[in-house]
Image (cartoon, rainbow, N blue to C red):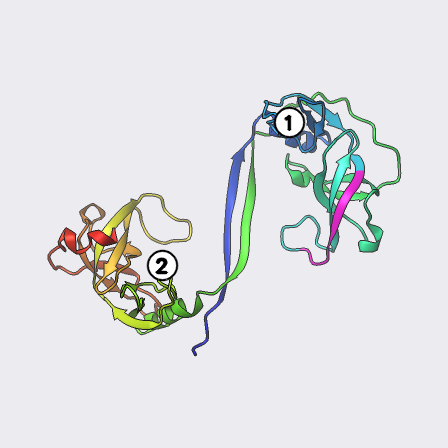
Amino acid sequence: MPEVLKAPLVVEFPFTRSLGPVQSAFLTGLRERVVLGVTTTDGRTLVPPVEYDPVTADDLRDLVEVAPTGTVTTWAWNHAPRRGQPLTTPFAWVLVRLDGADTGLLHALDAPGPDAVHSGMRVRIRWAEERTGAITDIACFEQYDGEPAELTGSTGEFADPVGGIVAAARLDYTYSPGRAQTAYINSLVDRRTVGERCPSCRKVYVPPRGACPTCGVPTAEQVEVGPRGTVTTFCIVNIKAKNLDIEVPYVYAHIALDGADLALHARIGGIPYDQVRMGLRVEPVWTDGARYPDHYRPTGEPDADYDAYKELL
């Protein structure tokens, strides 16, 4: 049996979020070395603060300062920190109930080892040297044996409040397409497109999934389809992708390859974007060394009749 493919993949993007008055005050306070919570309808103080009462759903706007010292309520040891985490050396994830708060704040605790951490231990905030109005303004927690720290008397009103944040979202994972799609990908190296036929309904699926999505039975019979096909539906792309060297506008379409019962998607080229239409007959265009078609272009054949592809819309 051919080896199943696998490859490391990364999904990464900057996430931009605007802040309401409560979150703005909380993050601006961190910039100024002040920790703010919010008072709920029943008198509890939540840190980090939220904008709506988790019990009554009432709007919450009453900010209150709490101390930068507190007590560990629970913890877990992180023996292998990952990229982007608060510390580069092993540390403990801790929930800390700051003095004056009724809930726990999740952050990192700098400790020499797991034997040095326990629920009930006293800690304090170690502030980052450079603060911008983000949760990373708390560099981490550290052990502290003193009394609760004194408050600054802040009311939650600050000059130049933080209005929004940008958080880097990243997911690292290993992807395996499985047996069926491995065979499909390997066939593309030879400029062939191979699907699999369901033994029950006899439909041919491209790309193959290893099982029929209609009947739920395994598929194994390989069937070569195409290379030509028919545009079933399409969209016009007007926003340029950061890492894609294609000028906008361009067309992305669902294409039903001849002999297939499932449309795949690909870019349409060789024709002005405003002339692409449903029923357009197309064929793949390969570039040297490519593992898959660069795009599809018109074949010059008459458009396919709607009844020939309506079931694939």
Please tell me which residue is depicted at 59% across the width and 23% down the height of the picture: 58
What residue is shown with label 2? 213
Q: Residue furthest left?
A: 302
What's under tag 2, amino acid-wise?
Pro
What residue is shown with label 1? 25
Q: Earlier in the sequence, mark 2 or mark 1?
A: 1
Q: Quadrant of residue 140?
A: top right
Please tell me which residue is depicted at 31% across the width and 72% down the height of the picture: 222
Residue 205: x, y in percent?
31, 63
Q: Quadrant of residue 178?
A: bottom left
Name the quarter where the N terminus is drawn: bottom left
- Asked if residue 17 shows in the view, the reply is yes
Count the numbered circles shown.
2
Q: Along the line of sight, which residue is nearer the eye, 286 or 92?
A: 92
Give me the C-alpha separation between circle 2 and circle 1: 50 Å
Which region of the structure is painted magenta? Answer: 71-81
Residue 225: x, y in percent?
25, 68
Q: Is residue 128 inside the magenta stretch? A: no
Q: Is residue 96 above or below residue 58?
A: below
Q: Of helix, strand and loop, which one carries label 2? A: loop
Residue 250: x, y in percent?
28, 49
Q: Describe residue 144's horizontal placement relative to residue 275 as left or right.
A: right
Other residues around mark 1 within 10 Å, as few (<14) / some (14–19) / many (≥20): many
Query: Magenta stretch mostly in which secondary structure?
Result: strand
Residue 147: x, y in percent?
88, 33
What's under tag 1, amino acid-wise?
Ala
Please tell me which residue is depicted at 85% across the width and 41% down the height of the picture: 144
Q: Along the line of sight, which residue is nearer the eye, 19 or 70?
A: 70
